[in-house]
Amino acid sequence: MRGMTNYSDMKDGDLAQLGRSRPLSLAQLFWAFTWLSLQGFGGVVAVVQRELVDKRRWLSRDEFAEEWAVAQVLPGANVVNLSLMLGDRYFGWRGGLTALAGLLTFPLLTVMALAVLFAGVSDQPQVQGALRGMSAVAAGMIASVALKLIPSLKTNRLPALMQWGMIAITFVAIVVFHVRLIWVLLVIGGLGALWAYRLLGQQQPAAPGRAPASDSDPAPGEDTP
């Protein structure tokens, strides 16, 4: 939680505090997301984990997995949602808007310029083949992000067998049967959330001042020697 963490003493690139660093200014946050977005051919998700977790260490892998899951459930583009959450984490609403501006400004100008140039060559086979090649590379980069996040499943509340089962069902539903993502999120994601909520409820700590019962404790109504 933001209120429980003191980020004021953390420096960019310094791993001494909580195992990660932080953006030092709004300008640094803006240019970080600008550089991130300019690398995102085929989608920023392929590089966002590398930039924010591995390189800058603004998030741990577990934090990234949690916030990325929230960003996917919320309406809108996943990376846009993540930029707003990360900017707000360190600088409040100003940070959210700054991160969003860095993510969108230069890519928007670049896309507008490329659209004008692409209009005259879009029908050429060489251009279409190049775009198909880019899409294959982007798919591979996205798969590599998923593989890097697999270790974070160890800290998940759900049993490992159920986690892998949900991953398999999701893959089959989207790739094989082409089920719309919204229904996959509502059904499979909803069941997973309810099951995790149930497990968390079963792990509530004992009441203050009362130690948890052990096997050696006498049953109610049983006399003690």
Image (tube, rainbow, N blue to C red):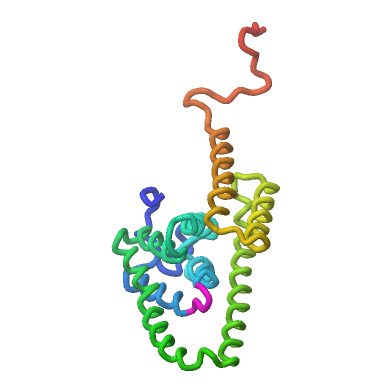
**Place of residue 66 in the rendered image (x, y in percent of width and height, measured from the top left):** 51, 54
Observer-nearest of 211 and 137 = 137
Q: Residue at x 34, y 63 (%)?
A: 96
Residue 197 in picture, x, y percent from top left: 54, 39
| Horizontal relation, residue 27 to residue 41: left or right | left
Quadrant location of the C terminus?
Answer: top right
- From the viewer's perspective, is residue 197 above or below residue 143? above
Q: Residue farthest to the left?
A: 94
- State the image quarter where residue 58 is shown: bottom left
Q: Nearer the viewer, residue 34 or 130?
A: 130
Q: Residue furthest right?
A: 161
Magenta part mainly helix, strand or loop? Answer: loop
Front position in the image: 172 or 147 = 172
Find out whether residue 71 is within the magenta segment.
no
Taking the view exactly as shown, the residue that stands out farthest to the front is: 123
* Magenta span contains residue 41: yes
Residue 171's spot in the image, x, y percent? 65, 59
| Residue 200 screen position, x and y as percent | 55, 38
The region drawn magenta spans 39-43
Residue visible at 62% across and 78% down in the picture: 136
Q: How many marks?
A: 0
Q: Residue at x 67, y 54 (%)?
A: 169
| Residue drawn at 60 percent across, 82 percent down | 132
| Residue 127 in the figure: left or right of residue 59 | right
Residue 98 vertical position relative to residue 68 in the rendered view, above or below: below
Quarter residue 124 falls in: bottom right
